[in-house]
Amino acid sequence: MGKDTDSVIIKGFLKEIPIFKSLSDRHLSRLSENFIVCRVNRGETIFHQSDDSTDLYMILDGAVRASLVNEDGEELILAAFNRGDFFGEMSLLDGKPRSATMIAVDAATVGVLKRDAFLQAVKDDPIIAIDLLSAMVQRMRMADGMIESLAFLDVGQRLVRLLMQIARTAGEKDQSGFFRIKRLTHRELAARTGASREAVSKAMKVLVFRGVIKENEGHFLLSPLAEEIL
Ligand code: CMP
């Protein structure tokens, strides 16, 4: 794709993004010309925690996760981002190293914007800063929820809370009130609940024994009992 075509696609796309919704057509054109479009493969790392860079990223297509990874390769997933979401705003704003590693969950297309171009857009229309703050506050609320789970819930409760969240957004309820959701590996569950894989396997065994979860080929069935555990 040529730069001009990219810029037209990005301009159309930016119009749909809440933080850029109030920019005039002229300012949108200027901003879109400064975006560089990159394609990333599934599983590819976009940047690592501690990297020194200050670009802002927008997801044009696909999905990306923000993770902390320790020396043993254990991962804690902080957040997942989809089409229309942005990331990289923390280093953009304070100039410090990246706070997390960004990995493509699925093949993704991202637009990359230099810090100076973003700051110019904020000068063009300061409401962008308010919308950015509002998105960051929403992320802080999610982070508070994660801290609360880590501090007050055991691994089994954290698993049930996560699976209920997935069930409410992407699950199907059958006639007996069971939610059917896509199966996740114990490794993924560990990364999303801040637990070790061993602790997840142990807690899952207990939940299966108590009839809260059924582990089937390709999916989990979550019993109505799950609501009572939280
Ligand atoms: P930055 O620190 O520049 O690079 C990593 C990005 O991950 C960060 O900006 C945010 O966009 C995102 N990120 C880091 N921590 C969190 C969190 N707790 N919740 C949501 N997003 C986060």
Image (cartoon, rainbow, N blue to C red):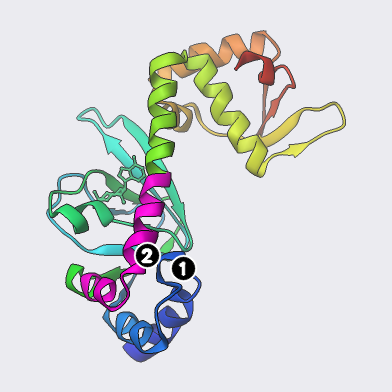
Q: Is residue 152 above or below residue 216?
A: above
Tell me where residue 123 appears, x and y as whole percent.
Answer: 24, 74
The residue under the point 42% across, 62% down is 108
| Magenta run includes residue 124 | yes
Q: Secondary structure at mark 2?
A: strand
Q: Is residue 1 above or below residue 77?
A: below
Q: Earlier in the sequence, mark 2 or mark 1?
A: 1
- Residue type at mark 1 is Ile
Comparing 133 with 55, the one in front is 133
> Which of the numbered marks, if any, corresponds to residue 17?
1
| Magenta run includes residue 52 | no
The residue under the point 49% across, 26% down is 186
> Which of the numbered marks, if any, corresponds to residue 58?
2
- Residue type at mark 2 is Met
Give yes or no for contact between labels 2 and 1 (Cβ–Cβ under 8 Å): yes
> Which of the numbered marks, if any, corresponds to residue 115?
none
Tell me where residue 91 appears, x and y as whole percent.
Answer: 19, 53
